[in-house]
Image (cartoon, grey):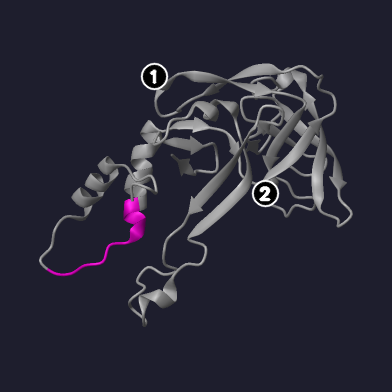
Amino acid sequence: LRRRGVPAAAIRDFAGRIGVTKSDATVEAGVLDYCTRELLNKTAERRMAVLRPLKVVIENYGEETEELEAINNPEDASAGTRMVPFSRELYVERSDFMEEPPRKFFRLAPGREVRLRYAYFLTCTDVIKDAAGEVTELRCTYDPASRGGASPDGRKVKATLHWVSAAHAINAEVRLYDHLFDRPDPEADGDFIDHLNPRSLDVLTQCKLEPSLADARLGEPVQFERTGYFCL
């Protein structure tokens, strides 16, 4: 549990919630997940990380780099803020773009405007593909008047995306841990070994992190913006 980032205080909270009985009982794993998330939401600082990157080029943005203020923890005002670099070339999550989006997909698509967290409104104008037809790059424009994430004319957007400046991004390997078993009670139907979850560990090797994570200390809890993943 420690290696997976579960704090001791979360385990104590879990033990207090489930109590003690005289007979055997099964508790849903989600209860421990809840206790862990409740604690880390209050104590872990937020950082931006793109786990499956898709490159974005903002065609009407210059070659300069600017620093934007970002909140460290919306649950704790005393955690303060940090500065994150913003530039012409960015990375966003590949899952935040669809060329032919379904009706309730509000994130980035051709001709659609979204908000970049702490930054500007962004509109996709062109899609670049490789020889196999896979999307490799998005060409976009931004609204300079929307700095900070609000437009002077009051227009609204339905999605806010996290991002990382390409020139300043840190390359990283990220390990995503899921439940060890593929069902709540693996011993209810045969041998528990038969119900191991083959995706209990997913290793991503081309992740892009914001530069402030270069100074992160081992064991320090951090939550990735919007993905909800915690890391140490």
Task: Give the residue at mark 2.
Answer: 95
- Camera-side residue: 79 or 2? 2
Q: Percent position (x, y) of residue 170?
A: 62, 33
Would residue 42 appear left or right of 17 to someone viewing this image? right
Task: Give the residue at mark 1.
Answer: 78
User: Vertically, is 202 above or below 124?
Assistant: below
Q: Residue at x 77, y 23 (%)?
A: 143
Residue 219 on the magenta segment: no
- SS assignment for the magenta stretch, majority: loop
CA separation, marks 1 and 2? 33 Å
Which element carries disc 1, helix, strand or loop? helix
The stretch of residues the image draws in magenta is 23-32
Which element carries disc 2, helix, strand or loop? helix
Would residue 145 appear left or right of 161 to someone viewing this image? right
Q: Percent position (x, y) of residue 83?
A: 57, 19
Give amino acid for label 1: Ser
Quadrant the C terminus occupies = top left
User: Vertically, is 224 above or below 26?
Assistant: above
Q: Are circles 1 and 2 on residues that touch, CB within 8 Å?
A: no
